[in-house]
Amino acid sequence: MLAHARALLTSSPQGVTDYLHADVHHPDDILQGAEKILDFAEPIALMMLGILGNVMDYHQARTIVDRLVSALPSGSYVVINDGTNVIHPDERNEATRLSIEAGTPYIARHPHQIAGYFHGLDLIEPGVISTSHWRPDPDADVPAMVDVFCGVARKP
């Protein structure tokens, strides 16, 4: 994965692109790597897409998010997208069970738990909702709800 990411990344005078190979369980390592290319005096976008389900303990996942958000300057944005088990609970719970058995756990969480990641931030409408319904194209048919919920928030 790292080799593929490096092959796809290119930078230009207008901006720098980089890939940080790190473990979400170690947010200080992530911040240390990010400080090498990001200016923490300016707003930053933190995107955690499908990663927090890899942290089995919800309170640990919240602590990780809190640590990363605490390092962001005011005006930064946080995007979190993760699996849930409310649309098709039987299928999703079985997938969670299999992921744990396989040794690569991915924990589906309730949307209220995903919303909890945004405490202290200004959540943008429509809030935490099924990803397929987060501001869909108004001219298109609204797709079916999926067991992945997301939200976007701004750090005051």
Image (cartoon, helix red, strand yellow):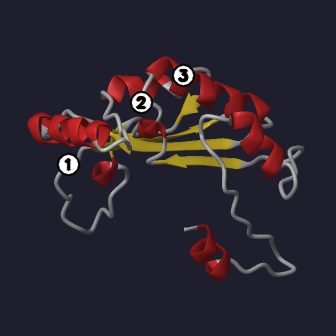
Question: Which of the two residues, 127 or 17, is positioned nearer the viewer here?
Answer: 17
Q: CA distance from mark 1 to mark 2?
A: 16 Å
Density class for disc 1 (Cα within 10 Å; few <14, some 14-19, many ≥20) is some
Eye-nearest disc, 3 or 1: 3
Residue at left offset 62%, top offset 74%: 3
Residue under numbered circle 3: 60
110 left or right, relative to 78 = left
Q: Give the SS element for disc 1.
A: loop
Q: Give the SS element for disc 3.
A: helix
- Label 3 sits on what residue type? Gln
Which image quarter holds the C terminus? top right
- Label 1 sits on what residue type? Met
Residue 130, numbered circle: none
Q: Position of residue 107 (x, y in %)?
A: 34, 34
30 left or right, relative to 38 = left
Residue at left offset 54%, top offset 68%: 1
Residue 156 visible at all: no
Density class for disc 2 (Cα within 10 Å; few <14, some 14-19, many ≥20) is many
Q: Earlier in the sequence, mark 3 or mark 1?
A: 3
Q: Give the SS element for disc 2.
A: helix
Q: Earlier in the sequence, mark 3 or mark 2?
A: 3
Q: CA distance from mark 3 to mark 2?
A: 13 Å
Residue 141 visible at all: yes
Q: In the rendered picture of this protein, how many numbered marks are placed on residues? A: 3
Q: CA distance from mark 3 to mark 1?
A: 28 Å
Residue under numbered circle 1: 145
Q: Are marks 3 and 1 in contact (CB under 8 Å)?
A: no
Q: Earlier in the sequence, mark 1 or mark 2?
A: 2
Residue 114, numbered circle: 2
Q: Are marks 1 and 2 in contact (CB under 8 Å)?
A: no
Residue at left offset 67%, top offset 75%: 6
The quadrant where residue 20 appears: bottom right
